[in-house]
Image: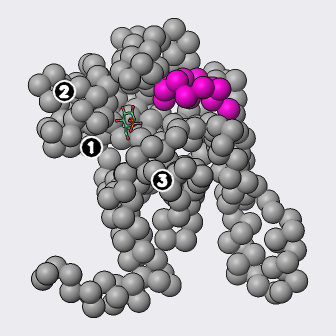
Amino acid sequence: MPITKAVITAAGWGTRFLPATKSIPKEMVPVVDRPAIHYVVQEAVESGIRLIVLVTAPEKKAIEDYFDRMPELERLLEAKGDMATLAEVRRPAQMARFCAVRQQEKAGLGHAVLAAREVIGNEFFAVLLPDDLIDGPEPCLRQMLRVHEQYGGSVVAVERVPREAVSRYGIVAPELLSGRVYRLRDMVEKPSPENAPSDLAIVGRYLLSPRLFDILEHTPAGRGNEIQLTDGIRALLREEPVYALEFEGQRHDTGNKLGFLKATVSYALRHPELGPAFRDYLCSLNVCHD
Ligand code: G1P
């Protein structure tokens, strides 16, 4: 059965990006000319996802509005004959079908995923964390779907991180299967460097078995007193196979300020209209010799 539903968790405060995120959802902060979450939806759609379940919070209505039609604005652009802008304005709502569910309290990533249970039902589904933009030769989620097609089971995306950074991630205990694919024996959320089972960190892409929902219902609060997705998947891998894929591509963590700046430069350089002029501008700065 093809995987066609994805959960995008977008209910957090965005504390790493204050003060901007005091009144703008962090997912709506633009990277070049569209909000960060647009790129994540695009990756999902290019991987075959047809229904996006947005897990949001009361103060984040702007996300739902972005993926909806805006008839008044559309009529205005139509009357002006600005068909190019009209197409851009319509595109987000046309990318997929969207529905939004509320996470009723900010009780952790596992709790946020559980909020989508009724919409997902009893089928494998994807989870994408919108802080992570992944730019690769092939959409990261599509690379993971190929692993799922070959081996079955759940799949998480991983990348190697410096030892001193392991405490910012879920870290896996891997057993190499072939190439870039691992079978997971264990995982731990944000370990200290001494206790980390490897340097392979989970990034914000998951393909998950619906069995996880039953598990999350009973997963106690863990690290940070929150219900952790990592703890749920850790229990899942005792019952069903869970794989990790060291994906091909470059990940940008747009949830932190430096990662966001790097993503902006990288996406701007590749932008078909802005790229060449932006490159000239960067070269003219000569900042490296200061
Ligand atoms: C979350 C997950 C963590 C994962 C990370 C990837 O942490 O809990 O396991 O490694 O995303 O970005 P967060 O960044 O929300 O603290």
Q: Is residue 142 left or right of residue 241?
A: right
Viewer-nearest residue: 179 or 239: 239
Using the numbered discs, state the Cα–Cα distance from disc 3 to disc 2 in whole angstroms: 29 Å
Asked where in the image residue 73 lies, by quadrant, the reply is bottom right
**Dot 1: few (<14), some (14–19), or many (≥20) neighbours within 10 Å?**
some
Type of residue at label 2?
A: Ser
Give the number of the disc on residue 19: 3
User: SS at mark 2?
Assistant: loop
Residue 46 seen anywhere in this rendered image of the structure: no
User: Which residue has dot 1 on it?
Assistant: 159
User: Which range is magenta?
Assistant: 102-116
Q: Position of residue 103 (x, y in %)?
A: 63, 29
| Label 2 vs 1, first from the N-terminus | 1
- In the figure, 177 relative to 131: above or below? above
User: SS at mark 3?
Assistant: loop
**Dot 2: few (<14), some (14–19), or many (≥20) neighbours within 10 Å?**
some
Type of residue at label 1?
A: Glu
Q: Are marks 2 and 1 in contact (CB under 8 Å)?
A: no
Q: Nearer the viewer, mark 2 or mark 1?
A: 2
Q: Position of residue 104 (x, y in %)?
A: 65, 26
User: Which residue has dot 2 on it?
Assistant: 192
